[in-house]
Amino acid sequence: MRVTLRKKFGYRVAALRRAAKVSQEALADRCGFARSYMSRIERGKANPSLDAIETLAGGLKVSVVTLFED
Protein backbone atom coordinates (compact mmCIF):
# COMPACT_ATOMS: atom_id res chain seq x y z
CA MET A 1 0.00 0.00 0.00
CA ARG A 2 1.35 3.41 -1.00
CA VAL A 3 1.54 6.08 1.67
CA THR A 4 0.32 9.38 0.25
CA LEU A 5 2.16 12.67 0.60
CA ARG A 6 -0.72 13.95 2.74
CA LYS A 7 -0.27 11.05 5.18
CA LYS A 8 3.52 11.49 5.30
CA PHE A 9 3.04 15.21 5.91
CA GLY A 10 0.50 14.56 8.64
CA TYR A 11 2.72 12.02 10.39
CA ARG A 12 5.58 14.54 10.29
CA VAL A 13 3.43 17.34 11.75
CA ALA A 14 2.25 15.02 14.53
CA ALA A 15 5.81 13.87 15.30
CA LEU A 16 7.12 17.45 15.44
CA ARG A 17 4.19 18.48 17.64
CA ARG A 18 4.83 15.63 20.07
CA ALA A 19 8.57 16.37 20.12
CA ALA A 20 7.74 19.98 21.03
CA LYS A 21 5.47 18.64 23.81
CA VAL A 22 2.50 20.59 22.46
CA SER A 23 -1.04 19.25 22.46
CA GLN A 24 -3.01 19.09 19.26
CA GLU A 25 -5.44 21.65 20.68
CA ALA A 26 -2.63 24.04 21.70
CA LEU A 27 -1.06 23.86 18.23
CA ALA A 28 -4.44 24.43 16.61
CA ASP A 29 -4.90 27.51 18.81
CA ARG A 30 -1.44 28.83 17.93
CA CYS A 31 -2.21 28.45 14.25
CA GLY A 32 -5.78 29.76 14.41
CA PHE A 33 -7.15 26.40 13.23
CA ALA A 34 -9.99 24.31 14.63
CA ARG A 35 -8.72 21.26 16.53
CA SER A 36 -10.75 19.06 14.18
CA TYR A 37 -8.85 20.51 11.20
CA MET A 38 -5.53 19.87 12.97
CA SER A 39 -6.62 16.29 13.56
CA ARG A 40 -7.50 15.87 9.88
CA ILE A 41 -4.09 17.23 8.86
CA GLU A 42 -2.27 14.82 11.18
CA ARG A 43 -4.30 11.86 9.89
CA GLY A 44 -3.65 12.78 6.27
CA LYS A 45 -7.31 13.53 5.62
CA ALA A 46 -6.92 17.26 4.92
CA ASN A 47 -5.10 18.87 2.03
CA PRO A 48 -3.63 22.00 3.66
CA SER A 49 -2.97 25.06 1.52
CA LEU A 50 0.46 26.64 1.19
CA ASP A 51 -0.68 29.33 3.61
CA ALA A 52 -1.75 26.68 6.14
CA ILE A 53 1.61 24.90 5.76
CA GLU A 54 3.43 28.17 6.42
CA THR A 55 1.23 28.78 9.47
CA LEU A 56 1.91 25.25 10.77
CA ALA A 57 5.66 25.78 10.43
CA GLY A 58 5.37 29.00 12.41
CA GLY A 59 3.26 27.33 15.08
CA LEU A 60 5.84 24.57 15.44
CA LYS A 61 8.74 27.06 15.21
CA VAL A 62 10.37 25.16 12.36
CA SER A 63 11.09 25.93 8.73
CA VAL A 64 8.62 24.89 6.05
CA VAL A 65 11.27 22.53 4.67
CA THR A 66 11.41 20.74 8.03
CA LEU A 67 7.76 19.77 7.64
CA PHE A 68 8.66 17.75 4.54
CA GLU A 69 11.82 16.02 5.80
CA ASP A 70 11.75 12.27 6.46
Image: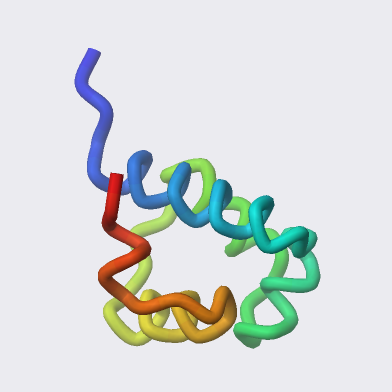
For this orientation, the residue located farthest to the top is 1
Which quadrant of the rendered structure holds the N terminus? top left
Q: Which residue does the image show at 59% across and 63% down from the upper left?
A: 37
Q: Position of residue 18 (x, y in %)?
A: 68, 51
Which quadrant of the rendered structure holds the C terminus? top left
Residue 14 drawn above or below residue 51: above
Colour mapping used in the image:
rainbow
Q: Position of residue 25 (x, y in %)?
A: 78, 66
Out of 19 and 48, give the one closest to the viewer: 19
Residue 30 drawn above or below residue 47: below
Residue 7 drawn above or below residue 64: above
User: Hey, which quadrant is residue 63 in on the image?
Assistant: bottom left
User: Hey, which quadrant is residue 66 in on the image?
Assistant: bottom left
Please indicate whether residue 51 sits to the left or right of residue 1 in the image: right
Please indicate whether residue 5 sits to the left or right of residue 42 in the image: left
**Count of numbered circles on the image:** 0
Q: Position of residue 44 (x, y in %)?
A: 42, 44
Q: Position of residue 31 (x, y in %)?
A: 61, 83
Out of 41 and 63, give the one closest to the viewer: 63
Q: Which residue does the image show at 56% across and 74% down from the upper left?
A: 60
Out of 34 and 57, give the one closest to the viewer: 57
Residue 42 drawn above or below residue 53: above
Q: Which residue does the image show at 53% across and 81% down from the upper left?
A: 61
Q: Which residue does the image show at 71% across and 65% down from the upper left?
A: 35
